[in-house]
Each structure stands twice: as C-alpha cells, then as structure tokens.
C-alpha cells in the first residue's frame, strides 16, 4: 500500500534562482555533453579505424535511433516533467505512482520496439537511404543497439526522473559513469578485439547496463525523495494519460527528427552520394554536442520551472526561463562561430579522407548559417513542456521540422542542388524562430492580463 513520501524539496520554491539554476544546470550540462562526447568519440574511432564508408553507414542509423529516443522520451520526459509539477503541488503519492508507471511502460515499449526493429531492420534501412555498400555497417551496428534497447529506455527514462525529483548531481554521475565505461570499452572492442562497428555498439549497451543498475538502485532506496513502493507499478490510465500528454511534445520532436533525417539522407544521396551522407553524420555529431549543452540548460530549467509553476510563483518561473534563454543563445552563437571558422579542422578529426573533409566543411557552413537563433527556439519549446502546456510545445516543435524543414528540403535543391539541401536547415531555423517569438509574446501578454484581473 502506498504511503506519503517524506521529502526535502522546498528549496525549489525558496532558494535564490541563480543558485538553483546553476546547481541544476551544471550537472545536466555535464551529463548531456558527456553523453554526446562519447557518441562523437565512437564516430572518430569508427571513421579512423573502420573507414569513411562506415561513417556513412552509421549516419543511416540516426532515424532509427531518433525513433527509439522518441518512444523513450514519450515516457521519460513526460514522467519527469509531471513528477516536478506534482512535487511542487505537494502530491508526493501521485509522483511515486508516476515513477512506477513510467518504469513499466519503458520496459513494455523498449521490448516491443526491439522486436519490431530487428524483424524489419534491412527494409527499414533501405527506406532510410542505405545502399549495398553502407547497409552492412548500419545492420551490424543496429542489431546490437536494438538488442539492448530496453536497457537504454530504462536508464534514460529513470535518470530524467532522478534529476527532476531533486538529484541533479546524482543524475550527472550516472551519465558520467556510462560515458567513462563506454570510452574505455569502445577502443578496446573496435581496435584491439577487431570487432569493428559491432564493438562500438556493444560498448554502448554494456555501459548503459551499468547506468541502468545505478538508477534502479537509487529508486529502490527508501531515503530517495521519490522511490519505488508497493502498489506504484499498477498501470493507471489517468497517470499514463498525464505522462503521454506532456511527453507527446518531445516524442513528436524525435519522430519529426526521424522523418527529417530520412528526407535529408534521400536528398543528400540523390545530389551527392553515399559520402555526403557520411558528411551529414559528422555534422550531426558536432551539432548534437552543441545542442546537448543547450538541452542541459533546458533540463536544468525544467524542475525549477515545473515546481514553481505548480506552486504559482510566476515571477520565479519567468526569471528562470530568461536565464536559460540567455545562456542557451550564447552557446548556439559560439557554436556558429566555431563552425564558420574551423569546419575543416573539425571534419579532419573524424577521418583523413580529403573528399569527405571537403564535403563536411562546405555542408557545415551552410547547414549552420542561422544556428545562433536555435537556442531561443529550443528553450522556448522546452519551457512550455515544463509547465504542462503540451499543445504549444508540440506546435513549436513541429513548426520547425515538419511544417518548415521537410518542404524546404524538397524545394531549395530545385534551385541550388546539394547546397540547397544544406541551406534548408538554416531557412527553417529562421522561419520557425519567428513563429516561436510570436507564440511566446502571445502567451506572455495573456499571462500578464490574467495577473491584472
């Protein structure tokens, strides 16, 4: 039977915002950045020890990885945001039930995705743009990753809840633990054991297994603010509806990213061939690192905003959002400058193939032309998710990737061919940021009007 959980979480509603902001953001940034760095290290090992075509094969797996992440965030992001809001409202029993329901759903979805993915792997990869030269690499990698998919779902899902329930440093440590293990095992498996791209995948799964054990141990401990209790694992339609309503936004973001990557691979293959898809894989890795820093700020913002929104302390919500926006925009602007000034040096770290380096450098400059404004669009969308405004968050997320980017990926190449494919991203960033600004202004004016009445 469930009992009320004793907790010490009042600091989210009383402590100085700047102190809270950094205490939550720094661990989140370290965790998300570290995770992105080990993905980059994997690609560097694969590019230099397996070959340039292996990078192209790996790039073909991005849509499947995004789709797997979509189902993971449907539960994980939705549950973590919901737990923050519930704790702010003082409803700890409901937070505990949300934790238990999220674990069961992560297991169900993770296993189902693995089975379907493994059965239809080759046809899926061909749809995603694979050729006879690249599919062996993509297949070898994804067979291992899909085999451990349920582990990934449990680890990332519960790690998000750990952070949202008041343990940002512990959540950071769990990610750093997996990164360290992966960085040690990857070169050993790829180079020393000669397992190639399969070795990279196996290192990732084994590292995440350790991370999963870590987070499960946390939630089994009775002193944790939110922890497993008898009865919390019984699935509830109402709780799942609450989780999915908030998690639907990041779910659709990842599904849209999957569709975008598929179309991107089609268009790059059509106008440039397999090697250009490899260039996109490198660019995606670099952008992923920058966006993971922004995502770290957004994750650090989420429990503070969620709690204070639930506690109706709107001034603290606004202050936290503005701080997050400022630092996220600084990071995307800095990433833009590095990409413009040193694209060849970045590409060279992944491979020594001169053709691949040239394609990557040209693509990076065009792809990231509007990158400074991406931080604003990303944080604003995550802000609405954090306060439970799922519909607004979904709309903002889809405006960039589905309503803007996919049509532009077909339109701009008609005029500029391969360069048009690269430029579509920058054009989409510009249009969607204008839309985001309008939505945010409307929400602010509405909130201000409510405060005066």
Image (tube, rainbow, N blue to C red):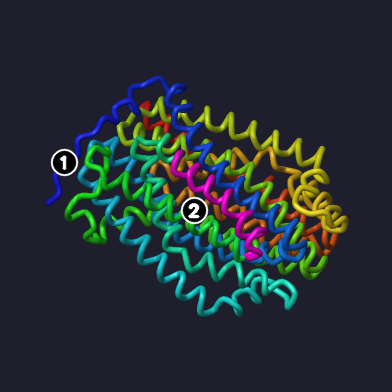
Q: Is residue 89 above or below residue 231?
A: above
Locate residue 210 relative to residue 45 in the image: left or right: left
Q: Residue at x 52, y 27 (%)?
A: 323
Which tag, 1 or 2, sits closer to the chain's start? 1
Q: Quadrant of residue 281?
A: bottom right
When the figure is inspected, residue 107 is found, relative to residue 184, above or below; the finding is below
Question: On the rendered structure, is 359 left or right of 228?
Answer: right
The range drawn in magenta is 172-197
- Locate residue 56, reporting x and y percent: 72, 64
Dot 1: what SS? loop
Q: Residue furthest top?
A: 16
Q: Which residue is mark 1?
A: 4
The residue shown at (37%, 36%) is 167
Whether the magenta-drawn stretch holds residue 180 is answered as yes
451, 92: nearer the viewer: 92
Mainly helix, strand or loop, the magenta region?
helix
The secondary structure type at the circle numbered 2 is helix
Residues under labels 1 and 2: Cα distance?
34 Å
Q: Is 410 contained in the magenta span?
A: no
Work out whether residue 352 can be spotted. Answer: yes
**Rendered image: mark on residue 207:** 2
- Is the residue 116 above or below the residue 329 in the image? below
Q: How many marks?
A: 2
User: Which one is nearer the viewer's eye here, 238 or 107?
Assistant: 107
């Amino acid at each position: 039977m469930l009992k009320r959980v004793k907790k010490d979480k009042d600091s989210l509603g009383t402590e100085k915002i700047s102190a809270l902001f950094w205490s939550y953001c720094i661990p989140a940034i370290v965790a998300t950045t570290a995770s992105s760095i080990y993905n980059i290290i994997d690609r560097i090992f694969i590019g230099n020890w397996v070959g340039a075509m292996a990078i192209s094969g790996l790039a073909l797996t991005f849509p499947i990885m995004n789709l797997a992440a979509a189902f993971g965030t449907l539960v994980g992001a939705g549950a973590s945001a919901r737990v923050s809001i519930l704790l702010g409202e003082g409803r700890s029993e409901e937070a505990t039930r949300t934790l238990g329901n999220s674990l069961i759903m992560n297991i169900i979805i993770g296993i189902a995705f693995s089975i379907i993915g493994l059965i239809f792997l080759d046809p899926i990869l061909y749809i995603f743009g694979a050729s006879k030269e690249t599919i062996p690499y993509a297949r070898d990698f994804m067979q291992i990753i899909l085999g451990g998919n349920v582990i990934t779902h449990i680890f990332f899902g519960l790690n998000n809840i750990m952070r949202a329930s008041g343990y940002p440093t512990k959540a950071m440590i769990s990610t750093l633990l997996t990164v360290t293990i992966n960085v040690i095992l990857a070169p050993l498996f790829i180079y020393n054991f000669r397992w190639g791209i399969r070795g990279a995948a196996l290192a990732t799964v084994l590292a995440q297994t350790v991370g999963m054990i870590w987070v499960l141990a946390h939630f089994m401990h009775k002193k944790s603010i939110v922890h497993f209790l008898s009865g919390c694992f019984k699935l509830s339609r109402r709780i799942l509806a609450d989780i999915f309503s908030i998690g639907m936004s990041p779910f659709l973001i990842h599904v849209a990213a999957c569709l975008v990557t598929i179309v991107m691979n089609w268009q790059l293959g059509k106008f440039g061939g397999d090697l250009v898809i490899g260039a996109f894989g490198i660019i995606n890795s670099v952008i992923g690192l920058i966006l993971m820093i922004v995502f770290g700020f957004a994750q650090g913002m989420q429990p503070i905003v969620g709690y204070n929104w639930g506690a109706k302390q709107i001034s603290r919500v606004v202050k936290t959002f503005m701080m997050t926006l400022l630092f996220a925009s600084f990071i995307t602007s800095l990433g833009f400058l590095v990409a413009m000034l040193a694209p060849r040096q970045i590409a060279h770290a992944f491979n020594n193939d001169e053709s691949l380096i040239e394609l990557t450098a040209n693509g990076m400059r065009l792809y990231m032309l509007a990158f400074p404004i991406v931080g604003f669009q990303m944080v604003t969308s995550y802000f609405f998710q954090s306060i439970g405004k799922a519909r607004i968050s979904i709309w903002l997320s889809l405006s960039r990737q589905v309503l803007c980017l996919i049509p532009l990926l077909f339109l701009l190449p008609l005029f500029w061919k391969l360069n048009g494919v690269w430029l579509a991203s920058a054009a989409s960033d510009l249009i969607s940021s204008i839309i985001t600004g309008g939505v945010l202004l409307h929400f602010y004016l509405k909130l201000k009007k409510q405060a005066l009445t």
